Image (cartoon, grey):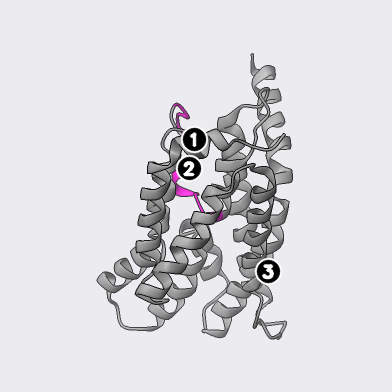
């Protein structure tokens, strides 16, 4: 019985790992940048190491560096965190059904959900002979480790290596463009992709770059809910 469980876990890891390789590249560079940035701000390497482990929210961790340098204001920290990561509310709603019956793994999947893990776990075609719970667990765990590894390494090497980090944040943008193109090629109907381009653009024009995220996510949620049947009928290209 134990041997069968180990084989199941190993198989899930082997299936999940290739999906996370592109994430490793982006997280390693961005994590390194974050670690170096924390060093420049005057923090020891263990700050980015611990923060990347217990917070695991890249944008918030960059902002947290400034919050730590300023006056203690927990309400401001809470508000900023909610504004920056509000999109995860919608991620969580869409994953409720997928996380059902996951047992103890569900708690880590909720904690470790980031944009990249959500993208993989929501869209990946998991083989029928691979345990879905362990697959999603390893996707989340590996991505978490990549960020932790990069941030810690950046904090350690920050005092030794000086380089210009400008433009490194575009790595993640490029990765999401690739994910979008892969989904576009796989689908026969592009309703969801077109909505994903159109609605945020409208909200950006109406609300501005600082305030468009929440209205855009709300509009996408409403549109995808209304058009769910139509989108599901679109299916994937054979």
Specify few, some or many for label 2: CA neighbours under 10 Å numbering under 14, 14-19, or 20 or more: few
Q: Earlier in the sequence, mark 3 or mark 1?
A: 3
Dot 1 and dot 2 residues touching (CB under 8 Å): yes
Give x and y (percent) for residue 47.
51, 70
Residue in the picture at 59% in, 42% down? 123
Specify few, some or many for label 1: CA neighbours under 10 Å numbering under 14, 14-19, or 20 or more: some
Query: Viewer-proximal residue, 157 or 62?
Result: 62
Q: Which of the image's four quarters has the C terminus?
A: top right
Residue under label 1? 105
Q: Is residue 90 left or right of residue 192?
A: left
Q: Is residue 102 left or right of residue 19?
A: left
Residue in the picture at 71% in, 43% down? 17
Give x and y (percent) for residue 204.
42, 72
Give the distance between the C-alpha atoms of the residues marked 1 and 2, in whole angstroms: 5 Å
Q: Which residues are magenta?
A: 101-115
Dot 3 and dot 2 residues touching (CB under 8 Å): no
Q: Which mark is residue 108?
A: 2
Q: Which mark is residue 211?
A: none
Residue under label 3? 29
> Is 31 rendered above or below residue 95?
below
Where on the picture, by quarter, is residue 73? Answer: bottom left
Give the distance between the C-alpha atoms of the residues marked 3 and 1, in whole angstroms: 28 Å
Give the distance between the C-alpha atoms of the residues marked 3 and 2, in whole angstroms: 24 Å
């Amino acid at each position: 019985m134990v041997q069968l469980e180990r084989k199941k876990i190993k198989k899930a890891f082997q299936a999940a790992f290739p999906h996370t390789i592109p994430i490793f590249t982006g997280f390693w560079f961005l994590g390194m940048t974050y670690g170096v940035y924390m060093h420049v701000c005057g923090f020891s390497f263990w700050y980015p190491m611990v923060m990347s482990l217990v917070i695991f929210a890249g944008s918030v961790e960059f902002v947290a560096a400034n919050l730590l340098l300023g006056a203690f204001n927990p309400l401001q920290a809470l508000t900023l965190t909610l504004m920056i990561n509000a999109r995860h509310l919608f991620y969580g709603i869409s994953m409720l059904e997928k996380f059902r019956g996951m047992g103890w793994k569900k708690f880590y999947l909720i904690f470790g959900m980031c944009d990249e893990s959500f993208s993989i776990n929501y869209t990946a075609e998991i083989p029928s002979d691979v345990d879905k719970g362990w697959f999603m667990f390893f996707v989340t765990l590996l991505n978490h480790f990549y960020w932790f590894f990069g941030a810690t390494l950046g904090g350690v090497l920050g005092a030794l290596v000086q380089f210009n980090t400008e433009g490194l944040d575009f790595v993640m943008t490029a990765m999401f463009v690739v994910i979008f193109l892969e989904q576009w090629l796989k689908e026969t109907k592009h309703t969801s992709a077109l909505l994903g381009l159109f609605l945020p653009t409208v909200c950006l024009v109406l609300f501005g770059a600082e305030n468009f995220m929440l209205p855009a996510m709300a509009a996408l949620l409403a549109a995808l809910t209304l058009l769910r049947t139509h989108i599901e009928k679109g299916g994937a290209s054979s």
